[in-house]
Amino acid sequence: MKVSIHHLATGVPGLDAILGGGLPEFSFNLITGPPGSGKTTLAHQMMFALATRERRALFFTVLGEPPLKMLRYQQQFSFFDPAKVNDTIRFVNLADEVAAGLFDRVLARILKEVEAFSPGLVFVDSFRSILPEGAQTAGGIGPRQFFQQLGVQLSTWQATSFLIGEDSSDGDTQPMFTVADGLLCLYQSVYRNSMVRKIQVLKMRGQNTSPGIHTFRIGGAGLEVFPSAVVPGGTETGSASAAPRPTARLTMGIPGLDAMLGGGLPVGYSLLVAGPSGSGKTILATEFLAEGARLGQPGVVVAFEQTPSQSWSRSIDDLVRSGKVGLINTRLLDLSIDEIVQRLIDLIHRMKATRVVIDSLSGFELAVAPTFREDFRESLFRMVSVLSGLGVTVLMTSELEDRYADLRFSPNGAAFLTDAIIVQRYVEVNGSLDRVMAVVKVRGSTHCTELRQYQITGEGLIIGAAVTGYEGLLSGRPARTPDTSPRP
């Protein structure tokens, strides 16, 4: 007969997803990581979420400080419930037994407390604190035997148990890694003023866990895990928009631009608007969102450079305030792409948004923590793919340095990820600096290939007639008036 394993909700946002559906009941788990990585906070957050009258928790501390000092800091988190302390949650200090250096006494005390309290949850924090004292003592069981017996006991009790401590390759602790059903590793790194925390499920028996390393943040509510974005369909190569597209199109809100795109922007497409500073990328994105709000199509803008009040039109600022357009505006220095994507997905679902603007990819890359920039291109592909899987239409802006010598669409090679591209350039025409615009591609659709001059006015972008009689406008070379003198 097949045994059914009940899964416990950890109470940690995002953690159940990477565990494969939750924590297996009656499993024996290890939580490892360097000092300050959040091991104890993670253990307390799960304990307060899971502890009930029917499933009581026993938390053993083996540090020299009393539990009261530890709880003093844990009370700062919103998950802390003082009503559960000494009722459904009990703390036991093993400092005296550990100081005596007798492993058998430490093990006997743990067994005694478990038998007396009959807990459904058992925590031991931390197993590394036991070694320095006990290793100096001769007689009785040694550290290797202690950890082996403790691991066996924790795995055989009718309780979900956790052993917490710093990661170590010490041979004395190896039996625990073998016996454990689950192994959660926490990491942290510092780059200048950025702190990046990550978690990895190295082992979880009988679970289809999410592979790889996932970022998490510690805030007032405790830990929040941001699972890595999963590309729809399970593919990680090729176009981010390989799935069949609907035939419906969205209007851009700029007279003449829909015609240039071949009838509007196809629903679910990703559009890259590339151009130098001041060319009107953000204004184009503004009109795109304002048109959606006018048609009852909610939008979301992710602003990585400036707030709407600084660079966006007052109309968009008003739409954000009225709740018709959602705003993600962050200046944090240690963001991961997974966190950005998760915040964006949550806002899209909450607002039922159909239009998304990312302004800009250049600011996006700067906002991402330095330790994540090495795989920025891959992560950007994942973000675009996830948004495409949600069926939203995405407009991204990209800041380009106008070199007047070559034609580029993205500073990080992201142009291939998009379904459509609009390029904006400055050109010199008869001693005057003008702006021109062209639709470079619209995947699977015919579109206008003409160069169009445009102006930025108080009413937004105004697209003019097609530019004729000039050479080199799109490539940035100085334009010249065609020679109309009579031929000999």
Image: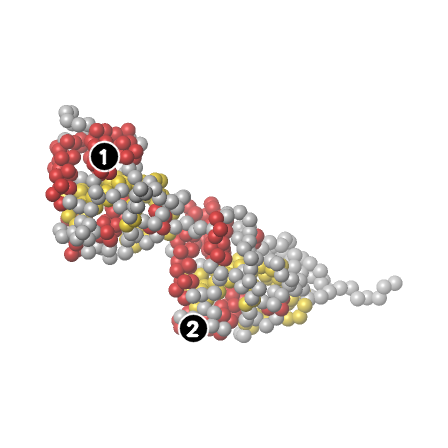
Disc sitting over residue 318 in the figure: 2
The crowd level at tag 2 (other Cα within 10 Å; few <14, some 14-19, many 20+) is some
Viewer-nearest of discs 1 and 2: 1
Q: In this image, 42 relative to 137: left or right? A: right
Q: Check disc 2 and report its element: helix, strand or loop.
A: helix
- Residue in view at x 20 percent, y 46 percent: 120
Q: Check disc 1 and report its element: helix, strand or loop.
A: helix
- Is residue 400 in view? no
Q: Nearer the viewer, residue 428 or 92?
A: 92
Which quarter of the picture shows residue 150? top left
Query: Which residue type carries mark 1?
Result: Val
353 w.r.t. 241: above or below: below
Query: Which residue type carries mark 2?
Result: Asp
Which quarter of the picture shows residue 125? top left
Q: Nearer the viewer, residue 263 or 197?
A: 263
Picture coordinates of residue 129, whole percent (x, y): 21, 37
- Residue sitting farthest toward the top: 139
Quarter occupied by the C terminus:
bottom right
- Residue in view at x 15 percent, y 25 percent: 138
- Return the disc, 1 or 2, that comes first in the chain's sequence: 1
124 w.r.t. 136: above or below: below
- Residue in view at x 18 percent, y 49 percent: 56
Quarter occupied by the N terminus:
top left
Q: Nearer the viewer, residue 392 or 169?
A: 392
The crowd level at tag 1 (other Cα within 10 Å; few <14, some 14-19, many 20+) is some
Q: CA distance from mark 1 to mark 2?
A: 62 Å
Picture coordinates of residue 437, whole percent (x, y): 62, 64
Picture coordinates of residue 73, whole percent (x, y): 21, 51
200 w.r.t. 85: above or below: above
Picture coordinates of residue 44, whole percent (x, y): 23, 49
- Residue sitting farthest toward the right: 488
Q: Which residue is mark 1?
A: 152
